[in-house]
Amino acid sequence: MSAALNLFLNQLLNGLTIGMVYALIALGYTMVYGVIGLINFAHGEVFMVGAYLALTAIWLAASFFPGIPFGLTLLFLILFSMAGASILGALIEKIAYRPLRRSPKLTALITSIGVSFFLQNAVMLIYGSKEQSIPDIVPMTRLKIGAISVSLIQILIFSVSIGLMFFLTWFVKNTKTGKAMRAVSENPEAAQLVGISPNRIIAATFILGSALAAVGGSLFALNYGSINFHDGYLAGLKAFTAAVFGGIGSIPGAMVGGILLGVFEGLGAGYISSEWKDVFAFLLLGAVLLFKPSGIMGNNVSEKV
Amino acid sequence: MLLEVRHIHTRYGKVGCLEGVSLSVKEGEIVALLGANGAGKTTTLKTISGLIHPAAGKIFFKEKPIDALLPEEIVRLGIAHAPEGRKIFQKLDVLENLELGAFIRLDKSEIQRDIEEIYQLFPILKKRMKQKAGTLSGGEQQMLAIGRALMSQPSLLLLDEPSLGLAPIYVSAIFQMIQKINKLGKTILLVEQNAHMALKIAHRAYVLETGRIALEGKASDLVNEPSVKNAYLGGS
Ligand SMILES: Nc1ncnc2c1ncn2[C@@H]1O[C@H](COP(=O)(O)OP(=O)(O)OP(=O)(O)O)[C@@H](O)[C@H]1O
Ligand SMILES: [Mg+2]
């Protein structure tokens, strides 16, 4: 196989990997926007906290259950991170945003930036300002499929992310809470008239979005081997870009937007320059906002803004 | 008395809208609430269902005060409000709208049975079951709005201008349907512009004028009232 194709496939794979993580974070942006019309800029920090919770879970597992199989540690760290981030998401909603429900959107937007700084500083105080390295709990085995080589962590990222995306799609389509989310998103007053409490549904949305971001954070930490308190900023901004690209408010849009952004970035890094990889995301954001502000799968932006 | 509204005052910001409205609805009745545009009919219904809280006055439902409760609590007590402009969930399909109408209920098998009952009442909804509600015609959307309200098993149904914007053949169909629903045991408080039809099916009626009840009585008496004839029945 030619070296050119090889490069392409490997960059595609790297792009898809990070794209899955972007998609998991983008879902939280889009769902929260869908129900309350807020761009929750603190969401990137929830992702970052999720990564730190995963690290904490690894420490806990290593000190209380030394020598347990890595599969169990993995399961534990993901569940631990999801649970912690869900609580955090619910608290953020309740303390920071709920009191502002009737205030102008800009007030809540600025508050979300404040929450974001608060979380960064809290994490810095607790875990230190230096980069923390993540112990290698997943074996470094690589699978060769033709010319491309896939790591175990990458396979993990694909299967967990795709699994969660299917689950979320099913959840929103079929469960009572999922239907109530769509109802609140469309018309909170009408939702109240059938007995739905918008506050509860909004809290549920934050919880769900935070749990997904935490999984993203855990997988991100495992894949890159280290985490820093300001990692949520860039990842959050990119995932936000992905959500806008897909059409903010649209769940399939966030999934597709995240994955495409990752691919775009991966190929850009491979063919143009890896130093510029962060720029591609923002070029994309600029282009989308300029030419198709409703995103590739969105159609209802004007209603909400 | 099933519902008793006592001297409610409702404001939007500083602007008063209802200036001491009192009305009552007995079990089994159809009560019409008539009035010109802007009289406060919608506001009265919204105050009853909890979407707005009155600045003063009391509302009792089954003898319990409800004026401080949230809409999601009031619907649990048995008041369903089919709001002005229908407010169905456009992006959800017809079946999902009906299922959400039963949001407060947990009795799955009975919910299924009630959905079938709604389909019997409005057969067109069954045909449109999997269609997005926003793609329904105005008349069909109105049927869905009423169907959704019925799904909460209310004892009192608040209907805000169910005939608004409908073609004449739909208008008489909707009024017949309201009468039928009443015969099936639902008490109804009906807000209407179409005073003629409303007075035909109602037992009693109130006339609201700029936030105050100007007239009340048996529907059959009000039809012959000169002021009602002039203002709401086209003078004839
Ligand atoms: N959200 C609101 N904010 C401010 N004023 C309002 C609001 N809703 C209604 N009003 C005012 O309150 C008054 C009564 O309105 P309401 O909608 O209750 O009238 P209505 O009798 O239902 O009229 P229509 O027949 O046109 O539906 C009107 O003057 C209206 O402008
Ligand atoms: Mg009205």
Image: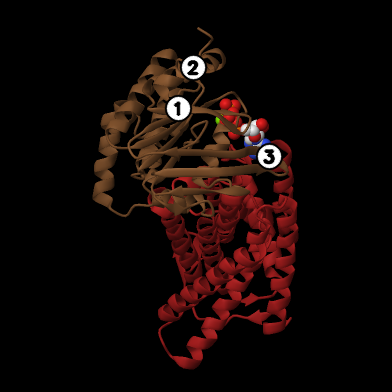
Chain colours: A red, B brown
Amino acid type of the residue that numbered disc 3 sits on in the rendered structure: Gly
Q: Secondary structure at mark 1?
A: strand
Up-down: is B178 above or below A175? above
**Distance from Cα at disc 3 to Cα at disc 1:** 26 Å
Residue drawn at point x = 74 percent, y = 65 percent: A114
Amino acid type of the residue that numbered disc 1 sits on in the rendered structure: Gly
Question: Which label belongs to residue B16?
Answer: 3
How dense is the environment of label 3, judged by Cα within 10 Å: few (below 14), some, or many (20 and up)? few
The residue indicated by pointer 2 is B225
Question: Which label belongs to residue A226?
Answer: none
Q: Are marks 1 and 2 in contact (CB under 8 Å)?
A: yes
The residue indicated by pointer 1 is B217
Q: Quadrant of ligand 2?
A: top right
Point out the tag, 1 or 2, that comes first from the N-terminus: 1
Please tell me in which quadrant of the rendered image residue A76 appears: bottom left
**Distance from Cα at disc 3 to Cα at disc 2:** 29 Å
